[in-house]
Image: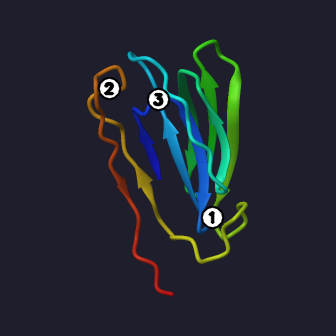
Amino acid sequence: MISGHSHFYEHNLVNGIHHLVIGSAGAPLHDPVNASYTIKSAKDYNYAIGDVTPTSLHLIVYNAGGTVLDSFDLRKGGTSVGRTEAEPQNCELQQNHPNLFNPSTTIRFILPVLEV
């Protein structure tokens, strides 16, 4: 789950699902509130660069000065940290619209339904 516009960076892991808050810009920073499921948080302007393949997602999160705040990999087949259930066979992450410099952006994604 990737969301943005909360004016801080946060990476949480809840029930085997990574939740990311990325992309603070244009407003004063807020203090993130850490919980037991928080892996990493930072009161810093940030952005992420991801590399998506059919079998993996590699994400690096940077602050505005270019320093790495966080990075992680998710892999198909249950090999990623915190994931043990079946992974989808096909997924698609589409281009955001409008661009990230607008007040809001939409990122569409497609995930097949898993038979458990």
Q: Residue at position x 66%, y 59% from top?
A: 75
Q: Position of residue 71 (x, y in %)?
A: 69, 39
Q: Is residue 35 above or below residue 116?
A: above
Q: Is residue 7 above or below residue 81?
A: above
Closer-to-camera residue (107/21) = 21
Rendering quarter of residue 107: top left
Q: Residue at position x 32%, y 48% from top?
A: 108
Rendering quarter of residue 78: bottom right
Q: Residue at position x 46%, y 28% from top?
A: 7
Task: Measure the alpha-carbon separation of dots 1 and 3.
Answer: 25 Å
Residue farthest toward the top in the current orientation of the protein: 65
Is the residue marked by circle 1 packed among few (<14), some (14-19), or many (20+) residues within 10 Å? some
The reply to whether dot 2 and dot 1 touch (C-beta < 8 Å) is no
Mark 1 element type: loop
Closer-to-camera residue (70/56) = 70
Sequence-wise, which precedes: disc 1 or disc 3? 3
Q: Amino acid at mark 3?
A: Gly
Q: Amino acid at mark 2?
A: Asn
What residue is shown with label 1? Answer: 76
Rendering quarter of residue 92: bottom left
Q: Nearer the viewer, mark 2 or mark 1?
A: 2
The reply to whether dot 1 and dot 3 touch (C-beta < 8 Å) is no
Mark 2 element type: loop
Q: Position of residue 40 (x, y in %)?
A: 67, 41
What residue is shown with label 2? Answer: 99
Mark 3 element type: loop
Residue 23 marker: 3
Q: Is residue 56 visible?
A: no
Q: Nearer the viewer, mark 1 or mark 3?
A: 3
